[in-house]
Amino acid sequence: MQTVMISPAELDALIEKWQTYYAVYVPALAKPAAATTDWAPGWRRFVEGEPLILPVGPTPASVKTFYFPQPETLLSFSLEENHPDKGAMREPVKSQGMQVVLGVRPCDAASVLLNQLPFIEDPLYMANCQRTALVGFTCTSRLSTCFCTEMGGSPLHSAGLDLALSSLEDGFILEVLSEKGEILVAGCNLVPASASDMAGLTARRQGAAPGDSVQLQLLRSCALNRLYEAPMWQALGEACINCGACTFICPTCFCFDIQDEVVQGQGRRIRYWDSCMFPLYSQHTSGHNPRGKKLQRTRNRFLHKLKYFPDRFGPFSCVGCGRCIGDCPVNIDIREVLSDLVRCTELE
Amino acid sequence: MISFMPYPVRIEDIVVETEDGSLKTFTLAFEQERHRKGWQHVPGQFVMLSVAGAGEAPVGLASSPTEETLLCTVNRAGMVTTALHQLKVGDRLGLRGPLGNGFPLDGEMKGKNIVMIAGGFAVTILRAALMAVLARRQDYGRVTFIYGARSPGMLLYQQELRQWAQRGDIDLYVTIDREAPGWAGLVGFVPTIAAQVAPSPENSVALICGPPIMIKFTMPPLEAIGWKDEQVYLSLENRMKCGQGLCCHCNVGPTLVCKDGPVFTRAQVKRLPMEY
């Protein structure tokens, strides 16, 4: 894998070249006038000649939508009366085309790797991984809600990206990080990055050391019961209105519902994003609900990210993008939840 | 590998099990030979049954792999099971599975005395376990089967209950909640009968399936005579969608009922948060 220099003009030319072969998406900073097939929530197709503008911090919507689109068709069937195969379930036809997502931040790139842990055996998710290339920009500044470093990440990380761009005074260092990345830059005559530029990037990265903080280590080694029974959930459960906004904008929330949808005799089974904040999520057909209380649902979301997921897979299921902090209507801050939990681990 | 594509199956037979018609047993046959040949399951496992247009619902398998046919006894409760109940012999269904872990018939149960305690229609998966035990009767010790329902008309598998009673190698106790005309058998709630029967915990394993309230009151008399939580197997249920440990719906704390269960020892269940 190579590390090269690329000027803004060369980058523009490269993106225009991708445009002829692949579907190229960029962050949509404004809501599109109408939903079209060239659109994914929070993202839009790149238009030639338009400047690429990235927000400070994470993009408005996470890249989850490219790997785990909603809805995703699981199978299709016909319920037409005279159909010879009425009710027979057929494999869905999946799009094969490559898509390039441009403007991805390191936090979102890390989320793709985290979500692969549960989805590694899911053929639909993994097929989307195969056909999606992530071109990311490391962060030069951060929002007040950004906390990737607290979650063991870094604004300069490149893990999960196929191409990583880090800005210099007069251009970018472009790191080619995967086979997909190699394909994207194939045929370009780009100058290898100078030793001093590479050393500069390495030095900056060392400043933001990754890994579990002391806080995270405490949480990791604490028994579940202590965290589950912590008194803090009472106040948090009262504050949370269970709107589910945090779960939908979260790059690492991945639970889903499955339903059948029939339109004029043609049916399909779809999966789409769900939220453990909703009472119906866990309600039995009998009416019994194991998480019937708001407190229980609020606790479930945070403990899933900070205890259940790490217990099962290793890493914490949070990349510190801070989207949920910005969008929560009642100002719940996962960083405060985290430090309150850590305090619980220290109480005797 | 995770899959959402059900096997196509046809309904070969339907038996209305209970007097109120709320429970029907469906005999299912794979449409494709390769699916039938490749099928293997363990009693205690479940499947996702799907009716195109209505959706999928988890249903415990009522038959043992030692039987020729695949049986599912379905309680009419929600959208999918209501749609299922309207189907006729010959109609097509989807079946995904087998899912979950099942009872340890070849593990901790082997060579032991087996006590099965069932309340209501939770008896379906214990029927599967009992049929597997009977198919290899010499592999197990004493077999005690305690089964209770609200009324005689709510008892499932009535013909088989009579056959089991005549075998002589099962201690069978069938009870109904209240006196009923024409009923000459036991009367009383399952916990009461279990306390009277008082099966010895020595070299024994118990499988208990029923409503939570029944399990709650069945345990104290068993504990009083020495039963330990590690010897008692329960089957949990929670709302499920994927059945393969991915969609997160059925989580009880860090545990996924569909993938880590649905069968757990009572000791394991006690360590979980009360989210089931």
Image (cartoon, coloured by chain):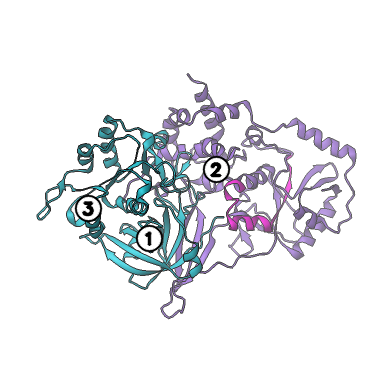
Callout 1: chain? B
Respond whether the residues carrying marks 1 and 2 are from the same subunit.
no
Q: Foreground mark, 2 or 3?
A: 3
* Residue A328 drawn at (x, y percent): 52, 41
Q: Which chain is purple?
A: A
Q: Which residues are magenta?
A: A116-139
Residues at circles 3 and 1 in contact by the CB criterion of under 8 Å: no
Q: Nearer the viewer, residue A43 or B143?
A: B143
What residue did someone put label 1 on? B67
Residue type, label 1: Glu
Callout 3: chain? B
What residue did someone put label 3 on? B165
What residue did someone put label 2 on? A327
Please say whether residue B155 is visible from this viewpoint.
Answer: no
Respond whether the residues carrying marks 3 and 1 are from the same subunit.
yes
Residue type, label 3: Ala
Which part of the image, by quadrant, shows the C terminus of chain B? top left
Callout 2: chain? A
Q: Is residue A143 magenta?
A: no
The residues bearing labels 3 and 1 have C-alpha atoms spaced at a distance of 20 Å
Q: Is residue A117 magenta?
A: yes
* Residue B43 drawn at (x, y percent): 39, 52
What is the drawing colour of chain B?
Answer: cyan
State the residue at coordinates (20%, 60%). B19
Residue A241 left/right relative to A122: left
The first of marks 3 and 1 along the sequence is 1
Q: Foreground mark, 1 or 2?
A: 1
